[in-house]
Amino acid sequence: MQLIDSVILGLVQGVTEFLPISSSGHLVLVREWLSIESTEALAFDAVLHLATTISIIIYFRKDLWVLVQAALRKMGRLPVNERDLKLVYALIAGTIPAVVLGLATESFYEKEAQSIGLVAVMLFVASVFFMYVEWRYYLRPTHETITVKRGMQIGFFQALALLPGFSRSGSTIAGGMLLGMSRYEASRFSFLLAIPITLGVGLKKSIDLLQVGSSVQWGIIIVGAIVAAVTAFIVIHFFLEFVRKYTLWPFIWYSLILSAFVGYVAFIG
């Protein structure tokens, strides 16, 4: 693997991780194009997930500090802001479904989910789903706040991201919108909910990576990680500002076009 491959993968991970266009699907496609070996792919999965997790932790550092204080004050039986505590509980509840389903389907994901044909199909299915969500939101825009129940329900939507081509951020944002939240509030919760999942995946794959040995090109991988972290930080800010004013339709059309292209390559070309 060359340095340019690392930079390209870092950019792809950084741009797509928090946009509703599926980072896993894009990485499968780009690795196929660059002919990245499985050992190097494992290394990138681990380090790039940790890199983008660091970027989102830094971006939401003030929010996370408030939530940590709320949790500590609750454990210490001190007065606490109920809204902050409710968000803590919602994040915990929302994390559980993806963790349970992820562990249950891990073997399938590792064996079957690298198929570009499956990526094409899931990109199309996700696009149709997001179309429906935008249509519903257009007919009945609401601005509900997060609750523990909604957090758990959004967690089940997050589990859809176990399928490559089905965006994690897209599925959780869409889930929040279906449950009555605004695009911005659903996006903010989606990003906060990403932290335990992406951190857990990154740490688990890092442990797996220790078994690879000295064949991993750490210098090149770290360059990709830095690119991914910086890019992701910029994309988070851009997307949150974007959804304050606009819809998800640009990302829907992009995913539809991409699914058609990938489907052509996988099934016809």
Image: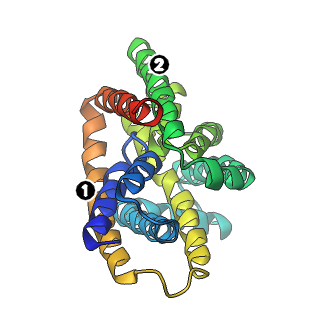
Q: Is residue 256 in view?
A: yes
For the residue marked with disc 1, what is the amino acid? Answer: Ile
Q: Please tell me whether mark 1 sits on a helix, a strand or a loop.
A: helix
Determine which quarter of the picture holds residue 201: bottom right
Q: Residue at x 34, y 61 (%)?
A: 9
**Marker disc for residue 234:** 1
- Picture layout, residue 102 above or below residue 249: below
**Marker disc for residue 110:** none
Q: Residue furthest right?
A: 104
For the residue marked with disc 2, what is the amino acid? Answer: Tyr
**Residue in front for this viewpoint, 78 or 222:** 222
**Residue in front for this viewpoint, 160 or 31:** 31
Q: Residue furthest top?
A: 139
Of the two numbered discs 2 and 1 on the same chain, state the one appearing first in sequence.
2
**Residue in front for this viewpoint, 78 or 99:** 99
Q: Please tell me whether mark 2 sits on a helix, a strand or a loop.
A: helix
Instruction: Judge from the rendering whether residue 62 lies leftward or rightward of residue 153; answer left or right.
Output: left
- Picture layout, residue 210 above or below residue 245: below
Q: Residues within 10 Å of mark 2 (few under 14, many from 20)?
A: some
Task: Give the percent coordinates (x, y) of residue 86.
Answer: 58, 48
Q: Residue at x 68, y 55 (%)?
A: 106
Q: Residue furthest front?
A: 269
Task: Give the percent coordinates (x, y) of residue 122.
Answer: 51, 34
Instruction: Judge from the rendering whether residue 64 lies leftward or rightward of residue 245; answer left or right.
Output: right
- Picture layout, residue 126 above or below residue 60: above
Residue beneath disc 2: 132
User: Which quarter of the figure is the N terminus placed in?
Assistant: bottom left
Task: Give the percent coordinates (x, y) of residue 242.
Answer: 25, 38
Instruction: Judge from the rendering whether residue 13 lies leftward or rightward of residue 78; answer left or right.
Output: left
Task: Give the percent coordinates (x, y) of residue 133.
Answer: 46, 22
Q: Residue at x 54, y 38 (%)?
A: 118
